[in-house]
Amino acid sequence: MAFTDKIYVKNHRQLASQLETNIPKGAFAGATLDMLFTGDGLSKLDSTTQDRILDFAEDFLDCDCQANPYCGCPEEKFMRYVLELRAEGLGPQAIVDVMTDDYMVYAYTGDVLSFLDDSVRNLEAVETLADVEGDEEMSDRARRAKRELSG
């Protein structure tokens, strides 16, 4: 299961009530994106919720792909956002708090921790492969990125 499959809409029931329909809890589920990012769905929401959803759309759904928002770019941008928060020194719980404040989405702290751990392990693999291939620049980049994520 991908990390972004574990990102949920905060106040899911309240949003479903305002939209007068059922929507999945997953923030990146196709039906959620369809309901929240069409003009009809957005206009039914209170202004604070609209602002957060528009921020989410601007930051993660803005790409030129023909299949947008189903192209994978939103998920990739969101994962980059989480990694950048970690590089700023935030721990898993603080990352959850920030994503909730910024976009009205949340994840379980353990899922964030697992994602960060997997990211470090992937960087270790990149570093090792780069060393084997003699690509010193890539090895150094992976090592620096790993240090940023490890704290």
Image (cartoon, grey):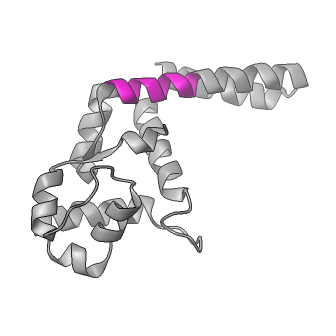
The answer to which image quadrant residue 141 occupies is top right
Q: Which residue is drawn at 27% across and 30% down?
A: 94
> Residue 56: x, y in percent?
34, 59
Q: Which residue is drawn at 21% across and 65% down?
A: 51
The answer to which image quadrant residue 60 occupies is bottom left
Compared with 135, 78 (above or below) is below
**Residue ranking furthest to the front:** 22
Q: Can residue 96 be seen in this view?
A: yes
Q: Which residue is drawn at 31% across and 62% down?
A: 55
Q: Is residue 9 left or right of residue 46?
A: right
Q: Main secondary structure of the magenta part?
A: helix
> Residue 102: x, y in percent?
26, 50
Q: Is residue 27 left or right of residue 79?
A: left
In this orientation, which residue lies closer to the viewer: 16 or 142? 16
Q: Can residue 89 be seen in this view?
A: no
Q: Is residue 15 left or right of residue 135?
A: left
> Residue 69: x, y in percent?
48, 66
> Residue 44: x, y in percent?
14, 75
In this orientation, which residue lies closer to the viewer: 13 or 116? 13
Compared with 100, 96 (above or below) is above
Q: Does the magenta stretch include residue 112?
A: yes
Q: Does the magenta stretch include residue 29?
A: no
Residue range highlighted in magenta: 110-120
The answer to which image quadrant residue 32 occupies is bottom left
**Residue ranking furthest to the bottom:** 40
The total of numbered circles placed on residues is 0
Q: In this view, does 9 lie to the left or right of 75?
A: left
Compared with 14, 115 (above or below) is above
Q: Which residue is drawn at 50% across and 44% down?
A: 80
Compared with 124, 33 (above or below) is below
